[in-house]
Image: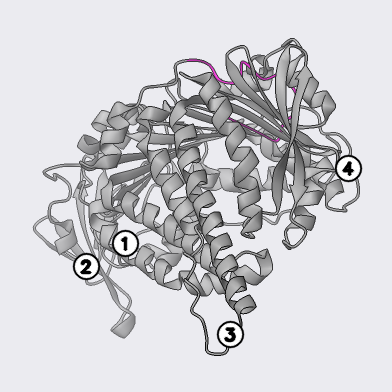
């Protein structure tokens, strides 16, 4: 009926979704006809409006762009009966299996009976029409049946069985998730029970390819290929556990004149992930209230009590297991070795054991630290002097967070550098009084033997140092110059970042119940970042709305929400091309 091309066009189309949408009753009628056991379902409420929006957005971002027919032209060309369907009404494509055949479509076809009779050789048995398009080996048969104003069509008559009045429809499936799916004009539903074996097979293949990928990436990054293999294996393992337990994935998208909004919602079978979500609660306070309103590239905050977050323990275990060096082999004296050679071998083995023990202690301390932290705020920006980062930790035992953080900074970075796993580290400088706060300070050090050191030096800056201290019952940290240290540890908070006009608008566009918030203002850093990379200096970028996202883990489905103001995209484009007026 149609191949991968039309599916790829359809699944990429949500990026260009538009606010015009069909009535909720029309969408509900369509969803009631689609069985919930389909592997993949794509629903759009007004395909014609979507297609027009694709052209309009492309034209807005690039006035010189050539007109294009858009994904709807592909669908009309590749989908038999495409010329008959009214694409201003809700339309659906669905696959029962994970191959590219056996696709079901559902749409409104005015006067379907009259149109079907115009096709030579078309026949009707019961309420199912059989229509043959083309001749010979290129002929294609479509079976279709009318359900009110809608037509259900497929290349297989068997695929129509149970469709139209299924035992359980997508409408019933989505009834309990109306807050996630309502008001959106594009929906993609993945039934993991149908695609799980394929996903797990793909992950297994990725695990087998890990050594080859590591050998290709290792020389360029300066990292040990064995470590890269371990990291890839850890990610595949996490993906496998997710694929084994996830029950469904829903993606909904809506794009208006001012912003694109998307939600990725996931539900789970009985298991550790579902149990974890059941224990979570929404954030207990507001984010970014302890950060001064200022330029930033990235801001993040989370509120997830560490002692109730085994997921963090799992991630630490997997990441560090991937980085852990091999256990030292006991020296085996060779015939003819002198005492000095034997002593050197024993010393090398002893040193390797010391480093392995230090690595184990680093894992223990890191796990303990994140088990103590309940909430976190962080702001990152690139200034003309290099990277600037500041933020705070809070938890039930603030002094413990402080002591563990100091230990990890003092020992972990040097351990990582010694093993060739890090380009930058931190050397203790002692305690410095800033305002009323005793601040532990660290110099940024670089491993000159690591190929990534030069790049790290460009980003970190020459005069930056790291400071950490307790202020107002929070562990605060700052990586930057003396002016940034003063701001974090001594200056009075004037205007919280949370009160910024653009930040408030971004947070208001996300769900009220969340555990993690991230903001990206990429445009603001492009001129400075480009200068650091040796590009011509661009002009300053006026403040504007950020791209924002949230993660909500305190209810099922777990969800990721993304809010992308169109103005944020325009600002990025204008920052990359500073000759254009802002």
Query: Of helix, strand and loop, which one carries label 1?
Result: helix
Pointer 2 or 3: first along the chain: 2
Real-space CA distance between mark 1 and mark 3, rounded to the nearest whole angstrom: 51 Å
Real-space CA distance between mark 1 and mark 2, rounded to the nearest whole angstrom: 43 Å
x%, y% of residue 205? 38, 70
Pointer 3 residue = 337
Pointer 4 residue = 538
Identify the residue at the far left of this view. Answer: 126
* Other residues around mark 4 within 10 Å, as few (<14) / some (14–19) / many (≥20): some
Query: In the image, what residue occupies the spot 43% across and 46% down?
Result: 315
Magenta-colored stretch includes residue 69: no
Q: Is residue 334 visible?
A: yes
Left or right: 439 with respect to 21?
right
Q: Quadrant of residue 429?
A: top right
Magenta-colored stretch includes residue 295: yes
x%, y% of residue 369? 49, 33
Real-space CA distance between mark 3 and mark 4, rounded to the nearest whole angstrom: 64 Å
Pointer 2 residue = 122
Pointer 4 or 2: first along the chain: 2
x%, y% of residue 382? 77, 38
Report the magenta residues as a range. 285-300
* Other residues around mark 2 within 10 Å, as few (<14) / some (14–19) / many (≥20): some
Q: Is residue 63 visible?
A: no
Pointer 1 residue = 200
Real-space CA distance between mark 4 and mark 2, rounded to the nearest whole angstrom: 65 Å
**Most frequent secondary structure within the magenta stretch:** loop
Work out whether 331 lies above or below 221: below
């Amino acid at each position: 009926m149609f191949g991968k091309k039309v599916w790829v066009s359809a699944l990429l189309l949500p990026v260009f979704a538009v606010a015009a949408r069909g009535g909720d009753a029309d969408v509900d009628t369509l969803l009631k006809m689609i069985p919930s056991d389909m592997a993949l379902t794509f629903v759009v409420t007004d395909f014609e409006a979507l297609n027009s929006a694709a052209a309009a957005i492309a034209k807005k971002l690039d006035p010189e762009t050539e007109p294009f027919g858009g994904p709807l032209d592909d669908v009309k060309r590749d989908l038999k009966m495409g010329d008959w369907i009214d694409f201003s009404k809700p339309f659906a494509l669905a696959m029962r299996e994970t191959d590219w055949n056996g696709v079901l479509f559902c749409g409104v076809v005015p006067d379907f009976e009259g149109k079907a009779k115009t096709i030579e050789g078309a026949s009707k048995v019961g309420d199912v029409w059989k229509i043959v398009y083309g001749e010979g080996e290129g002929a294609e048969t479509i079976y279709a049946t009318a359900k009110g104003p809608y037509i259900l069509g497929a290349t297989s008559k068997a695929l129509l069985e149970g469709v139209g009045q299924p035992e359980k429809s997508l409408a019933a499936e989505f009834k309990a998730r109306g807050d996630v799916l309502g008001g959106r004009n594009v929906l993609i539903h993945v039934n993991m029970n149908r695609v799980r074996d394929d996903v797990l097979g793909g992950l297994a293949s990725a695990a087998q390819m890990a050594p080859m990928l590591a050998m290709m990436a290792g020389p360029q990054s300066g990292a040990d290929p064995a470590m890269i293999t371990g990291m890839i294996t850890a990610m595949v393992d996490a993906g496998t556990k997710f694929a084994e337990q996830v029950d469904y994935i829903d993606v909904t998208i809506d794009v208006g004149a001012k912003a694109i909004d998307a939600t990725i919602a996931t539900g789970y079978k009985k298991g550790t992930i579902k149990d974890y979500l059941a224990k979570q609660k929404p954030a207990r306070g507001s984010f970014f209230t302890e950060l001064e309103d200022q330029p930033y590239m990235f801001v993040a905050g989370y509120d997830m009590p560490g002692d109730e977050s085994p997921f963090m323990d799992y991630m630490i275990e997997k990441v560090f297991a991937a980085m852990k060096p091999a256990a030292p082999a006991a020296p085996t004296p060779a015939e003819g070795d002198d005492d000095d050679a034997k002593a050197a071998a024993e010393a090398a083995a002893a040193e390797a054991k010391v480093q392995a023990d230090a690595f184990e202690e680093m894992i223990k301390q890191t796990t303990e630290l994140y088990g103590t932290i309940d909430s976190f705020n962080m702001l990152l920006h690139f200034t003309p002097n290099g990277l600037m980062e500041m933020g705070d930790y809070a938890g039930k035992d603030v002094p413990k967070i402080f002591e563990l953080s100091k230990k990890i900074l003092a020992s972990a970075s040097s351990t990582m550098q010694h093993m060739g796993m890090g380009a930058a580290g931190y050397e203790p400088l002692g305690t410095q009084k800033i305002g009323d706060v005793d601040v532990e300070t660290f110099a940024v050090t670089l491993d000159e033997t690591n190929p990534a050191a030069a790049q790290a030096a460009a980003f970190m800056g020459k005069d930056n140092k790291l400071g950490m201290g307790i202020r107002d019952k929070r562990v605060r940290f700052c990586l930057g110059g003396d002016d940034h240290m003063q701001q974090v540890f001594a200056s009075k908070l004037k205007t919280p970042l949370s009160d910024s006009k653009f930040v408030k608008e971004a947070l208001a566009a996300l769900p009220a119940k969340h555990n993690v918030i991230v903001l990206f203002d990429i445009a603001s850093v492009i001129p400075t970042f480009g200068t650091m990379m040796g590009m011509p200096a661009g002009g300053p970028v006026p403040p504007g709305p950020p791209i924002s996202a949230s993660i909500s883990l305190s209810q099922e489905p777990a969800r990721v929400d993304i809010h992308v103001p169109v103005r944020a995209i325009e600002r990025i484009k204008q920052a990359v091309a500073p000759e254009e007026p802002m």
